Image: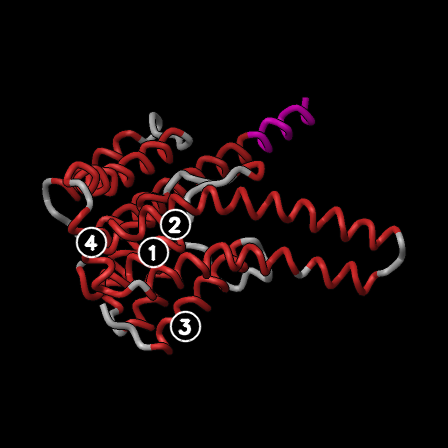
Amino acid sequence: MHLSILQIILLTVLAFIKHVDYYGIPMLFVNYPVFWGLFTGLLMGDVKTGLIVGGTVQLMSLGVAGFGGSSVPDYGTTTIIATAFGTSLGVDAGLAVGLPVGMLGVQLDVIVKILNGFVVRKSQEYANQQEFKKMTGILWLGPLLFGLSAALPVFLSVTLGQSAVNYLLEHMPTWFMSGLTLAGKMLPAVGIAMLLRFMPTKKYMSYLLIGFFLAAFLKVPIIGAAVIGFALAYIIYQRAEKDATLAAQGAGTQGFMGEDE
């Protein structure tokens, strides 16, 4: 993989913006891997690969969220690195490089949150001393540290070059590479299973089976299945609205009858 200096800089900046934006500063972009795959694909001149990688990582991240300050894999950084390498080495090889860095994001996120604890404590001291300029200044270290926790792994990954990546891939144990490939194929299923656990699956099991039949047996593209799903959801919505209207009318009729009595 040969990247120009401009591409390396733009990918590093993109990773920095992605992670700062993830924590709501100022949250300009939708934090979905498929979007970062699109942006990275534009930078690499291969939007198709970017969307494929982004969609694959998007499935991996379904049902995974960092509640209560917990740390989760950095799927956005995974997408950026996997797309950057996937454009020349192939999607599978790109994911094999990007996934370990994304998992490393858990440890980096924990480290940054610990460091930000000291930042907040110091800013509180400045606030107590009414040194508000210093308080504001040190608080900017928070987003800076978060941004660097994604930008540095991306910078180091893309600057290794294709020869270093090829050396890494060639000398990795077969069982390790097979495990990464298998994990990449299993994680989407795990994400969907976690998502279904919190949805009223039993109530709408028939629609789930219809979607599975369309995708698995009729090979309907995901957009086609989504259109059918939207149509069925709209029918359910109209039926619920009709039932609610009838219930309201029935309650009103009973109220008038009670007044007449």
Q: CA distance from mark 3 to mark 1?
A: 15 Å
Say which element carries label 2: helix
In magenta, the rendered stretch is: 251-261
Q: Is residue 8 above or below residue 204?
A: below
State which tag comes first along the sequence, 3 or 1: 3
Q: CA distance from mark 2 to mark 4?
A: 16 Å
Residue placed most toward the observer, 24 or 212: 24
Q: Residue at x 34, y 59 (%)?
A: 157
Q: Amino acid at mark 4?
A: Ala
Q: Residue at x 72, y 59 (%)?
A: 138
State which tag comes first along the sequence, 3 or 4: 3
Q: Is residue 204 visible?
A: yes
**Residue 195: image location, x then y, percent:** 37, 35
Q: Which residue is mark 3?
A: 10
Q: For the residue carrying disc 2, how many other residues have a C-alpha within 10 Å: few (<14), some (14-19), or many (20+)?
A: many
Q: Residue at x 18, y 48 (%)?
A: 171
Q: CA distance from mark 3 to mark 4?
A: 22 Å
Residue placed most toward the observer, 236 or 15: 15
**Residue 65: image location, x then y, percent:** 47, 40
- Determine which quarter of the picture holds residue 176: top left
Say which element carries label 4: helix
1 and 2 marks in contact (CB < 8 Å): yes
